[in-house]
Amino acid sequence: MSISSKDIIVEKVKTSKIDQIDFENLAFGSVFTDHMLICTYKNGAWETPKITPYQPITLDPSSKIFHYGQSIFEGMKAYKDKNNDVFLFRPLENHKRFNISAERMCIPQIPEDYFMEGLIALLNLEKDFIPTQEGSSLYIRPFMFASGNGFHASPADEYKFIIAFAPSGAYFSGKVKVLIEEKYSRSANGGVGYAKAGGNYAGQFYPTQLAVAKGYNQVIWTDDTNHEFIEEAGAMNIFVRINDTLLTGPTSDRILDGITRKSILEIAKDLGIKTEVRKITVKEVVDAAKDGSLKEMFGAGTAAVISPISGFGFRDTDYDLPELENSYGLLLKKTITDIQYNKSEDKYGWRVKVNA
Ligand SMILES: *Cc1c(COP(=O)(O)O)cnc(C)c1O
């Protein structure tokens, strides 16, 4: 079955809560819009999606999400330009990755029209919630989980696909000091690190808390075999600039294929920045920090776009990064956000206008 937005059942709220939102002081991902999209998978098929008031979900205590963690998500944003036109950024990439995550967790595939038509119908209803303050956007959270019942350790027979929106301010986290992790791993060969599966993030909290207790903000994940290679920064892809070369690791079972990461790689090449996609050793980063050739490190992901790293710790020694005038991170962030907010031409065809 294929659907269009007019097939979607819509139940509207009686009174909007938009007046209760302080758009001048938005945090990240903590207030929500009036409605959500919900769709149930039952008897081997997706039912017609519904837009309902944003509300709690009731589940049986034996729902498999609680016991076996079949749960995946995506993170996207909608942007408004100065003419109040609404845009998405490479949304089909999110849909594709959602289904890659779903396959790994034995969750049924969501068809492209359910994902895109559902998202656009909800966006058209909620477009007044898209903030226009500098750096703000509407954070979009599509997710899917096992709502089927039973204590048997096997895939559920029922699932829910939901999209919820959070008007959000800039994901500013100040100076980020990171710790290169050598004991715990985020992901492993043959594991689920490439999927946006809920449990991946639960597993990161404890090692991150230990790093925070030592005075760091985040963990730099290394490979699970020998902790020899730099892999990701918290829940972001990582970039390292040594002299004038911008490096990032190749995606794999263990490294999530970030849309920000691959957009940055293309933009950097077009800006004439030398890029290399290859394994980065902890040793070369530490050596470069010692001899001064390490210029920048930053995390890359939808929420923060680019999150500059001010220094890192490795085996009881802290290394500070220099403050640069011609930072690649700042230049790349401006270039990508100018495309997202329709402030510059998009020669890549990444910006998608949502018809309102
Ligand atoms: C979501 C995520 C990223 C960034 O992906 P984007 O598509 O750029 O938002 C990177 N690493 C991990 C582990 C992630 O979960």
Image (spheres, rainbow, N blue to C red):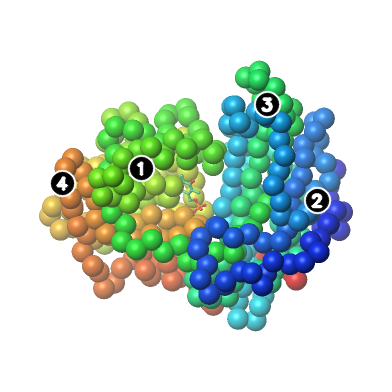
Of callouts 3 and 1, the N-terminal one: 3
Residue 174 locus on image (x, y percent): 34, 63
The residue beneath circle 1 is: 208
The CA span between labels 3 and 2 is 24 Å
Q: Which residue is at the far bottom? A: 83
Which residue is label 3 attached to? 62
Residue placed under numbered mark 4 in the picture: 317
Is residue 92 left or right of 220 when viewed as pictured?
right
Residue at screen point 32% across, 51% down: 217
Q: Label 1's element? A: helix
Q: Residues within 10 Å of mark 2 (few under 14, many from 20)?
A: some
Circles 3 and 1: CB atoms closer than 8 Å: no
Judged left or right of residue 214, residue 48 is right
* Residue behind mark 2: 50
Q: Dot 4: what SS?
A: strand
Left or right of residue 223, residue 324 in this image: left
Question: Number of labelled discs?
Answer: 4
What's the amino acid at mark 4? Thr
Q: Position of residue 213 (x, y in %)?
A: 28, 45
Q: Quadrant of the C terminus?
A: bottom right
Q: Earlier in the sequence, mark 1 or mark 4?
A: 1
Q: CA distance from mark 4 to mark 2?
A: 54 Å
Q: Earlier in the sequence, mark 3 or mark 2?
A: 2
Q: Within 8 Å: ligand 1 and the Cβ of disc 4?
A: no
Residue 65 lies in quadrant? top right
Viewer-proximal residue among 334 and 123: 123
Disc 1 to disc 4: CB gap under 8 Å: no
